[in-house]
Image: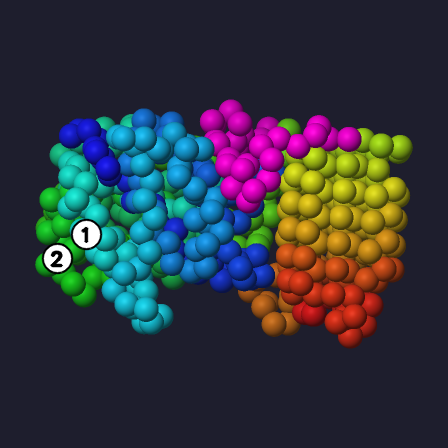
Amino acid sequence: MILNKDEPLVLLLAGGEGSRLNKLVQSRAKPAVPFAGIYRIIDFSLSNVMNSGFSQVGVMTQFKPLSLMRHLGDGSAWDLTGRTRGIKILPPRTGSRDSDWYKGTADAVRQNIDFIKSNPSPEVIILSGDHIYSMDLEDLLQAHRRKKADMTVATMVVSREQIHQFGTAITDADGRVVEWEEKPVHPRTDLASMGIYVVSTDYLLRTLETHLEDMDFGRDIIPRAIDHDQVYAYPFRGYWRDVGTIQALWEANMDILRPDAPLSPQAWGIRPNPEADGLPFDRYPVRLLGSGRVQNSLVAAGCVIEGKVINSVLSPGVRVGPGAVVRDSVLFHDCQVASEAVVDLAILDKQVHVGSGAVVGCGDEAEKNQANREYPKHLYTGISLVGKGAHIPVSSRIGRNCIISPGRRVAEFPDVNVASGETV
Protein backbone atom coordinates (compact mmCIF):
# COMPACT_ATOMS: atom_id res chain seq x y z
CA MET A 1 0.00 0.00 0.00
CA ILE A 2 1.11 3.56 -0.74
CA LEU A 3 -0.63 6.32 1.21
CA ASN A 4 -0.74 9.99 0.35
CA LYS A 5 1.13 11.65 3.22
CA ASP A 6 -1.94 13.72 4.17
CA GLU A 7 -4.45 10.87 3.87
CA PRO A 8 -5.72 8.92 6.87
CA LEU A 9 -5.59 5.15 7.13
CA VAL A 10 -9.02 3.57 7.57
CA LEU A 11 -9.56 0.57 9.85
CA LEU A 12 -12.93 -1.12 9.57
CA LEU A 13 -14.08 -3.31 12.45
CA ALA A 14 -15.92 -6.28 10.96
CA GLY A 15 -15.22 -9.03 13.47
CA GLY A 16 -18.19 -8.88 15.82
CA GLU A 17 -20.07 -12.12 16.40
CA GLY A 18 -23.48 -10.50 15.89
CA SER A 19 -25.25 -13.18 17.92
CA ARG A 20 -28.45 -11.11 18.25
CA LEU A 21 -29.04 -11.65 14.52
CA ASN A 22 -29.53 -15.29 15.42
CA LYS A 23 -29.67 -17.71 12.45
CA LEU A 24 -28.73 -14.97 9.97
CA VAL A 25 -25.14 -15.13 11.26
CA GLN A 26 -24.89 -18.89 11.67
CA SER A 27 -22.73 -19.14 8.56
CA ARG A 28 -21.75 -15.51 7.85
CA ALA A 29 -20.27 -12.49 9.59
CA LYS A 30 -22.70 -9.76 10.63
CA PRO A 31 -21.37 -7.19 8.12
CA ALA A 32 -22.05 -9.71 5.32
CA VAL A 33 -25.79 -9.95 6.07
CA PRO A 34 -27.86 -8.84 3.03
CA PHE A 35 -29.71 -5.54 3.23
CA ALA A 36 -32.18 -3.62 1.05
CA GLY A 37 -32.26 -6.16 -1.74
CA ILE A 38 -28.87 -5.88 -3.41
CA TYR A 39 -26.52 -4.72 -0.64
CA ARG A 40 -24.64 -6.16 2.29
CA ILE A 41 -24.40 -4.17 5.53
CA ILE A 42 -20.68 -3.51 5.09
CA ASP A 43 -21.32 -1.83 1.72
CA PHE A 44 -22.37 1.33 3.55
CA SER A 45 -19.11 1.84 5.45
CA LEU A 46 -17.00 0.94 2.42
CA SER A 47 -18.97 3.31 0.20
CA ASN A 48 -18.55 6.10 2.75
CA VAL A 49 -14.79 5.56 2.53
CA MET A 50 -14.92 5.63 -1.27
CA ASN A 51 -17.18 8.69 -1.44
CA SER A 52 -14.93 10.55 1.00
CA GLY A 53 -11.93 10.06 -1.28
CA PHE A 54 -9.90 7.76 0.96
CA SER A 55 -8.04 4.90 -0.62
CA GLN A 56 -6.53 2.51 1.95
CA VAL A 57 -8.63 0.27 4.19
CA GLY A 58 -7.79 -2.52 6.58
CA VAL A 59 -10.77 -4.77 7.39
CA MET A 60 -10.49 -6.58 10.71
CA THR A 61 -12.37 -9.87 10.48
CA GLN A 62 -12.94 -12.62 13.01
CA PHE A 63 -16.15 -14.67 13.23
CA LYS A 64 -17.12 -16.72 10.15
CA PRO A 65 -15.22 -14.45 7.75
CA LEU A 66 -15.39 -16.47 4.50
CA SER A 67 -18.58 -14.97 3.06
CA LEU A 68 -17.38 -11.51 4.00
CA MET A 69 -14.01 -12.08 2.34
CA ARG A 70 -15.70 -13.32 -0.83
CA HIS A 71 -17.87 -10.24 -0.83
CA LEU A 72 -14.94 -7.86 -0.43
CA GLY A 73 -12.94 -9.52 -3.19
CA ASP A 74 -10.13 -7.26 -4.33
CA GLY A 75 -12.03 -4.11 -3.37
CA SER A 76 -12.68 -3.05 -6.96
CA ALA A 77 -16.43 -2.63 -6.33
CA TRP A 78 -15.51 0.38 -4.17
CA ASP A 79 -12.54 1.61 -6.24
CA LEU A 80 -10.15 0.19 -3.65
CA THR A 81 -7.75 -1.55 -5.98
CA GLY A 82 -4.59 -0.38 -7.71
CA ARG A 83 -1.03 0.72 -6.95
CA THR A 84 -2.09 3.45 -4.54
CA ARG A 85 -5.45 2.03 -3.47
CA GLY A 86 -6.23 -1.15 -1.62
CA ILE A 87 -8.25 -3.18 0.84
CA LYS A 88 -6.48 -5.55 3.21
CA ILE A 89 -8.12 -8.35 5.22
CA LEU A 90 -6.78 -8.40 8.80
CA PRO A 91 -7.70 -11.56 10.77
CA PRO A 92 -6.58 -12.08 14.39
CA ARG A 93 -2.94 -13.08 14.37
CA THR A 94 -1.88 -13.73 17.95
CA GLY A 95 -2.92 -17.37 18.02
CA SER A 96 -5.39 -19.99 16.91
CA ARG A 97 -7.55 -20.37 20.03
CA ASP A 98 -10.77 -18.48 20.70
CA SER A 99 -9.04 -16.80 23.64
CA ASP A 100 -6.57 -15.25 21.20
CA TRP A 101 -9.31 -13.51 19.22
CA TYR A 102 -9.99 -9.80 19.43
CA LYS A 103 -11.11 -8.94 22.96
CA GLY A 104 -12.55 -5.55 22.05
CA THR A 105 -12.24 -2.68 19.62
CA ALA A 106 -8.95 -1.41 21.04
CA ASP A 107 -7.45 -4.89 21.20
CA ALA A 108 -8.38 -5.43 17.55
CA VAL A 109 -6.50 -2.28 16.56
CA ARG A 110 -3.58 -3.18 18.85
CA GLN A 111 -3.18 -6.56 17.17
CA ASN A 112 -2.73 -4.68 13.89
CA ILE A 113 -0.17 -2.11 15.01
CA ASP A 114 2.30 -3.49 12.47
CA PHE A 115 -0.22 -2.73 9.69
CA ILE A 116 -0.60 0.85 10.97
CA LYS A 117 3.17 1.34 11.15
CA SER A 118 3.72 -0.09 7.68
CA ASN A 119 1.18 2.40 6.27
CA PRO A 120 2.24 5.72 7.84
CA SER A 121 -0.53 8.27 8.10
CA PRO A 122 -1.27 11.36 10.20
CA GLU A 123 -4.55 9.89 11.46
CA VAL A 124 -6.40 6.60 11.69
CA ILE A 125 -10.16 6.53 11.09
CA ILE A 126 -11.87 3.64 12.85
CA LEU A 127 -15.27 2.53 11.52
CA SER A 128 -17.73 -0.25 12.23
CA GLY A 129 -18.84 -2.58 9.46
CA ASP A 130 -22.40 -3.09 10.71
CA HIS A 131 -24.02 0.35 10.52
CA ILE A 132 -26.45 1.75 7.95
CA TYR A 133 -25.60 5.40 7.29
CA SER A 134 -24.05 7.95 4.96
CA MET A 135 -21.32 10.20 6.34
CA ASP A 136 -18.78 12.57 4.81
CA LEU A 137 -15.66 11.21 6.49
CA GLU A 138 -13.58 14.03 5.02
CA ASP A 139 -15.67 16.53 7.00
CA LEU A 140 -15.16 14.42 10.13
CA LEU A 141 -11.40 14.42 9.49
CA GLN A 142 -11.23 18.17 8.98
CA ALA A 143 -13.19 18.78 12.20
CA HIS A 144 -10.60 16.66 14.02
CA ARG A 145 -7.76 18.69 12.53
CA ARG A 146 -9.36 22.08 13.24
CA LYS A 147 -9.66 21.22 16.92
CA LYS A 148 -6.11 19.82 17.01
CA ALA A 149 -7.69 16.85 18.75
CA ASP A 150 -6.00 13.67 19.89
CA MET A 151 -9.26 11.81 19.33
CA THR A 152 -12.60 12.73 17.80
CA VAL A 153 -15.74 10.69 18.48
CA ALA A 154 -18.67 10.86 16.03
CA THR A 155 -21.86 11.35 18.05
CA MET A 156 -25.56 11.80 17.49
CA VAL A 157 -28.63 12.53 19.57
CA VAL A 158 -30.73 9.44 20.34
CA SER A 159 -33.87 8.95 22.38
CA ARG A 160 -33.70 8.51 26.13
CA GLU A 161 -35.24 5.05 25.67
CA GLN A 162 -32.27 3.90 23.56
CA ILE A 163 -29.35 5.80 25.05
CA HIS A 164 -28.52 3.01 27.53
CA GLN A 165 -27.24 0.93 24.60
CA PHE A 166 -24.41 3.35 23.81
CA GLY A 167 -21.41 5.12 25.18
CA THR A 168 -22.52 8.66 26.04
CA ALA A 169 -20.66 11.97 25.95
CA ILE A 170 -21.12 15.16 27.94
CA THR A 171 -19.42 18.07 26.18
CA ASP A 172 -18.54 21.67 26.93
CA ALA A 173 -19.46 24.68 24.79
CA ASP A 174 -16.54 23.98 22.43
CA GLY A 175 -17.50 20.33 21.85
CA ARG A 176 -14.78 18.88 24.02
CA VAL A 177 -15.81 15.69 25.81
CA VAL A 178 -15.60 16.35 29.55
CA GLU A 179 -17.46 13.31 30.87
CA TRP A 180 -18.13 9.83 29.50
CA GLU A 181 -20.46 7.03 30.53
CA GLU A 182 -20.48 3.64 28.87
CA LYS A 183 -24.03 2.27 28.50
CA PRO A 184 -25.40 4.15 31.53
CA VAL A 185 -28.42 2.80 33.42
CA HIS A 186 -29.44 6.36 34.31
CA PRO A 187 -28.12 8.52 31.43
CA ARG A 188 -27.40 12.21 31.96
CA THR A 189 -27.22 13.04 28.27
CA ASP A 190 -28.80 12.10 24.95
CA LEU A 191 -25.52 12.34 23.01
CA ALA A 192 -24.46 8.84 21.93
CA SER A 193 -21.22 7.56 20.45
CA MET A 194 -21.59 6.06 16.97
CA GLY A 195 -18.49 3.89 17.37
CA ILE A 196 -16.71 6.00 14.73
CA TYR A 197 -13.38 7.57 15.71
CA VAL A 198 -10.59 9.67 14.26
CA VAL A 199 -7.37 9.26 16.24
CA SER A 200 -4.05 10.98 15.58
CA THR A 201 -1.72 8.13 14.69
CA ASP A 202 1.14 8.97 17.07
CA TYR A 203 -1.33 9.32 19.93
CA LEU A 204 -3.05 6.04 19.02
CA LEU A 205 0.19 4.05 18.90
CA ARG A 206 1.45 5.55 22.14
CA THR A 207 -1.82 4.80 23.91
CA LEU A 208 -2.10 1.21 22.69
CA GLU A 209 1.52 0.40 23.50
CA THR A 210 1.43 2.06 26.93
CA HIS A 211 -1.93 0.83 28.23
CA LEU A 212 -1.87 -2.85 27.30
CA GLU A 213 -4.78 -3.56 29.62
CA ASP A 214 -7.13 -1.39 27.56
CA MET A 215 -9.30 -3.63 25.37
CA ASP A 216 -12.09 -1.31 24.24
CA PHE A 217 -12.31 2.30 23.11
CA GLY A 218 -15.62 3.09 24.77
CA ARG A 219 -15.04 1.22 28.00
CA ASP A 220 -11.32 1.89 28.54
CA ILE A 221 -9.53 4.36 26.30
CA ILE A 222 -12.00 7.25 26.04
CA PRO A 223 -12.73 7.55 29.80
CA ARG A 224 -9.01 7.83 30.52
CA ALA A 225 -8.30 10.13 27.58
CA ILE A 226 -10.82 12.83 28.52
CA ASP A 227 -8.94 13.47 31.79
CA HIS A 228 -5.59 14.14 30.15
CA ASP A 229 -5.96 14.59 26.39
CA GLN A 230 -7.94 16.44 23.73
CA VAL A 231 -11.10 14.42 22.97
CA TYR A 232 -13.83 16.11 20.94
CA ALA A 233 -17.31 15.14 19.78
CA TYR A 234 -18.30 15.44 16.11
CA PRO A 235 -22.07 15.98 15.79
CA PHE A 236 -23.80 13.89 13.12
CA ARG A 237 -27.39 14.69 12.17
CA GLY A 238 -28.19 12.25 9.37
CA TYR A 239 -29.72 8.77 9.32
CA TRP A 240 -27.76 6.12 11.22
CA ARG A 241 -28.81 2.75 12.51
CA ASP A 242 -26.98 -0.10 14.15
CA VAL A 243 -28.62 -3.16 12.57
CA GLY A 244 -27.24 -5.66 15.03
CA THR A 245 -30.65 -7.08 16.00
CA ILE A 246 -33.47 -8.77 14.08
CA GLN A 247 -35.81 -5.93 15.02
CA ALA A 248 -33.39 -3.18 13.90
CA LEU A 249 -32.60 -4.99 10.65
CA TRP A 250 -36.30 -5.32 9.82
CA GLU A 251 -37.02 -1.70 10.77
CA ALA A 252 -34.17 -0.37 8.62
CA ASN A 253 -35.46 -2.30 5.62
CA MET A 254 -38.95 -0.92 6.27
CA ASP A 255 -37.52 2.62 6.53
CA ILE A 256 -36.61 2.45 2.85
CA LEU A 257 -40.29 1.93 1.97
CA ARG A 258 -41.60 4.97 3.81
CA PRO A 259 -42.95 7.81 1.60
CA ASP A 260 -40.50 10.16 3.34
CA ALA A 261 -37.72 7.55 3.29
CA PRO A 262 -34.90 8.77 5.56
CA LEU A 263 -32.35 6.55 3.81
CA SER A 264 -31.68 6.07 0.13
CA PRO A 265 -28.72 3.83 -0.74
CA GLN A 266 -28.83 4.81 -4.40
CA ALA A 267 -28.92 8.55 -3.72
CA TRP A 268 -26.16 8.12 -1.14
CA GLY A 269 -23.93 6.45 -3.71
CA ILE A 270 -23.78 3.12 -1.87
CA ARG A 271 -22.20 0.43 -4.03
CA PRO A 272 -22.91 -3.31 -3.80
CA ASN A 273 -20.75 -6.10 -5.13
CA PRO A 274 -23.24 -8.20 -7.10
CA GLU A 275 -20.59 -10.55 -8.47
CA ALA A 276 -19.33 -11.59 -5.04
CA ASP A 277 -21.17 -14.91 -4.88
CA GLY A 278 -20.56 -15.89 -8.47
CA LEU A 279 -23.88 -14.42 -9.57
CA PRO A 280 -24.16 -12.58 -12.87
CA PHE A 281 -23.78 -8.84 -12.61
CA ASP A 282 -27.33 -8.26 -13.72
CA ARG A 283 -30.39 -10.49 -13.84
CA TYR A 284 -33.44 -10.10 -16.03
CA PRO A 285 -35.88 -7.32 -15.05
CA VAL A 286 -38.64 -7.93 -12.53
CA ARG A 287 -41.49 -9.88 -14.13
CA LEU A 288 -45.12 -9.44 -13.12
CA LEU A 289 -47.13 -12.36 -14.46
CA GLY A 290 -50.86 -13.02 -14.41
CA SER A 291 -52.43 -11.21 -11.48
CA GLY A 292 -49.06 -10.32 -9.95
CA ARG A 293 -49.09 -7.04 -8.03
CA VAL A 294 -46.48 -5.05 -6.11
CA GLN A 295 -47.48 -2.36 -3.62
CA ASN A 296 -45.07 -0.06 -1.73
CA SER A 297 -42.21 -2.54 -2.01
CA LEU A 298 -38.59 -2.79 -3.13
CA VAL A 299 -38.23 -5.67 -5.59
CA ALA A 300 -34.81 -6.47 -7.06
CA ALA A 301 -33.99 -7.72 -10.53
CA GLY A 302 -34.61 -11.37 -11.29
CA CYS A 303 -37.79 -11.57 -9.22
CA VAL A 304 -40.92 -13.18 -10.67
CA ILE A 305 -44.19 -12.05 -9.08
CA GLU A 306 -47.44 -13.88 -9.77
CA GLY A 307 -49.04 -13.12 -6.40
CA LYS A 308 -49.08 -10.00 -4.21
CA VAL A 309 -46.09 -8.27 -2.61
CA ILE A 310 -47.07 -5.60 -0.09
CA ASN A 311 -44.73 -3.38 1.95
CA SER A 312 -41.80 -5.79 1.57
CA VAL A 313 -38.18 -5.95 0.42
CA LEU A 314 -37.18 -8.71 -2.02
CA SER A 315 -33.60 -9.54 -2.99
CA PRO A 316 -32.69 -10.83 -6.49
CA GLY A 317 -34.25 -14.06 -7.72
CA VAL A 318 -37.28 -14.28 -5.42
CA ARG A 319 -40.35 -16.00 -6.89
CA VAL A 320 -43.85 -15.40 -5.54
CA GLY A 321 -46.35 -17.91 -6.95
CA PRO A 322 -49.96 -17.45 -8.05
CA GLY A 323 -52.28 -16.47 -5.23
CA ALA A 324 -49.37 -16.10 -2.77
CA VAL A 325 -49.03 -13.03 -0.53
CA VAL A 326 -45.84 -11.51 0.90
CA ARG A 327 -46.54 -8.74 3.42
CA ASP A 328 -44.33 -6.65 5.75
CA SER A 329 -41.41 -9.01 5.13
CA VAL A 330 -37.79 -9.19 3.99
CA LEU A 331 -36.80 -12.03 1.64
CA PHE A 332 -33.18 -12.68 0.75
CA HIS A 333 -31.86 -14.04 -2.56
CA ASP A 334 -33.65 -16.82 -4.47
CA CYS A 335 -36.45 -17.55 -2.01
CA GLN A 336 -39.53 -19.26 -3.41
CA VAL A 337 -43.04 -18.69 -2.09
CA ALA A 338 -45.28 -21.28 -3.73
CA SER A 339 -48.89 -20.82 -4.82
CA GLU A 340 -51.44 -19.67 -2.22
CA ALA A 341 -48.75 -19.38 0.47
CA VAL A 342 -48.55 -16.39 2.81
CA VAL A 343 -45.46 -14.77 4.33
CA ASP A 344 -46.47 -12.13 6.87
CA LEU A 345 -44.04 -10.18 9.07
CA ALA A 346 -41.02 -12.41 8.54
CA ILE A 347 -37.38 -12.45 7.46
CA LEU A 348 -36.41 -15.30 5.12
CA ASP A 349 -32.73 -16.00 4.53
CA LYS A 350 -31.46 -17.11 1.12
CA GLN A 351 -33.00 -20.01 -0.82
CA VAL A 352 -35.92 -20.61 1.54
CA HIS A 353 -38.81 -22.53 -0.01
CA VAL A 354 -42.31 -21.94 1.37
CA GLY A 355 -44.62 -24.77 0.34
CA SER A 356 -47.95 -24.15 -1.35
CA GLY A 357 -50.72 -23.06 0.99
CA ALA A 358 -48.32 -22.59 3.91
CA VAL A 359 -48.44 -19.55 6.19
CA VAL A 360 -45.28 -18.11 7.75
CA GLY A 361 -46.37 -15.62 10.40
CA CYS A 362 -49.87 -16.40 11.60
CA GLY A 363 -51.50 -15.44 14.86
CA ASP A 364 -53.38 -12.57 16.45
CA GLU A 365 -52.02 -9.41 18.07
CA ALA A 366 -51.57 -11.14 21.40
CA GLU A 367 -49.30 -13.75 19.80
CA LYS A 368 -47.07 -10.99 18.38
CA ASN A 369 -46.09 -10.26 21.98
CA GLN A 370 -45.38 -13.90 22.73
CA ALA A 371 -41.58 -13.83 22.53
CA ASN A 372 -39.54 -16.73 21.23
CA ARG A 373 -39.01 -19.18 24.07
CA GLU A 374 -35.34 -19.92 23.32
CA TYR A 375 -34.39 -16.38 22.31
CA PRO A 376 -36.82 -13.98 23.99
CA LYS A 377 -34.49 -11.01 23.47
CA HIS A 378 -34.12 -11.71 19.74
CA LEU A 379 -37.72 -12.14 18.60
CA TYR A 380 -40.48 -10.44 20.57
CA THR A 381 -42.53 -8.18 18.23
CA GLY A 382 -44.09 -10.80 15.97
CA ILE A 383 -41.29 -11.20 13.41
CA SER A 384 -40.57 -14.82 12.46
CA LEU A 385 -37.19 -15.89 11.13
CA VAL A 386 -36.49 -18.66 8.60
CA GLY A 387 -32.88 -19.77 8.15
CA LYS A 388 -31.03 -20.25 4.88
CA GLY A 389 -32.21 -23.10 2.69
CA ALA A 390 -35.09 -24.18 4.92
CA HIS A 391 -38.16 -25.83 3.37
CA ILE A 392 -41.54 -24.99 4.91
CA PRO A 393 -44.04 -27.87 4.52
CA VAL A 394 -47.09 -27.57 2.29
CA SER A 395 -50.18 -26.17 4.11
CA SER A 396 -48.22 -25.68 7.34
CA ARG A 397 -48.85 -22.89 9.84
CA ILE A 398 -45.83 -21.10 11.34
CA GLY A 399 -46.75 -18.73 14.17
CA ARG A 400 -45.34 -15.39 15.35
CA ASN A 401 -41.80 -15.01 16.77
CA CYS A 402 -40.86 -18.44 15.45
CA ILE A 403 -37.40 -19.57 14.33
CA ILE A 404 -36.91 -22.19 11.61
CA SER A 405 -33.29 -23.34 11.55
CA PRO A 406 -31.17 -23.20 8.37
CA GLY A 407 -31.43 -26.21 6.09
CA ARG A 408 -34.47 -27.62 7.86
CA ARG A 409 -36.27 -30.06 5.56
CA VAL A 410 -39.96 -30.97 5.49
CA ALA A 411 -39.39 -34.41 7.04
CA GLU A 412 -37.61 -32.80 10.00
CA PHE A 413 -40.63 -30.80 11.18
CA PRO A 414 -42.19 -32.55 14.22
CA ASP A 415 -45.53 -31.06 13.18
CA VAL A 416 -46.68 -29.04 10.20
CA ASN A 417 -48.00 -26.45 12.63
CA VAL A 418 -45.47 -24.48 14.71
CA ALA A 419 -46.95 -22.49 17.60
CA SER A 420 -45.97 -18.88 18.16
CA GLY A 421 -42.67 -18.53 20.02
CA GLU A 422 -41.36 -21.98 19.08
CA THR A 423 -38.11 -22.98 17.35
CA VAL A 424 -37.68 -25.86 14.89
Does the magenta portion include 57? no
Instruction: Work out which residue is located at the far bottom of the displayed protein and give it.
Output: 414
Q: Which residues are the magenta region?
A: 260-287
State left or right for residue 410 relative to residue 4.
right
Residue 38 lies, in percent from the top left, at 58, 37
Q: Measured along the vertical axis of the image, is residue 403 above or below residue 331? A: below
Q: Measured along the vertical axis of the image, is residue 336 above or below residue 146? A: below
Q: Nearer the viewer, residue 165 or 9?
A: 9
Tag 1 residue:
113
Q: Are marks 1 and 2 in contact (CB under 8 Å)?
A: yes
Magenta-colored segment: predominant secondary structure = loop
Question: Quadrant of the rendered structure where residue 214 is?
Answer: bottom left
Residue 133 lies, in percent from the top left, at 45, 37
Which amino acid type corresponds to the residue marked 1 in the rendered image? Ile
**Residue 187 seen in the current view:** no
**Residue at horizontal 26%, vertical 30%?**
84
State left or right for residue 353 relative to residue 125.
right
Question: Closer to us: mark 1 or mark 2?
Answer: 1
State left or right for residue 326 relative to residue 164.
right
What number is the disc on residue 209?
A: 2
Q: Nearer the viewer, residue 188 or 43?
A: 43
Residue 386 lies, in percent from the top left, at 67, 58
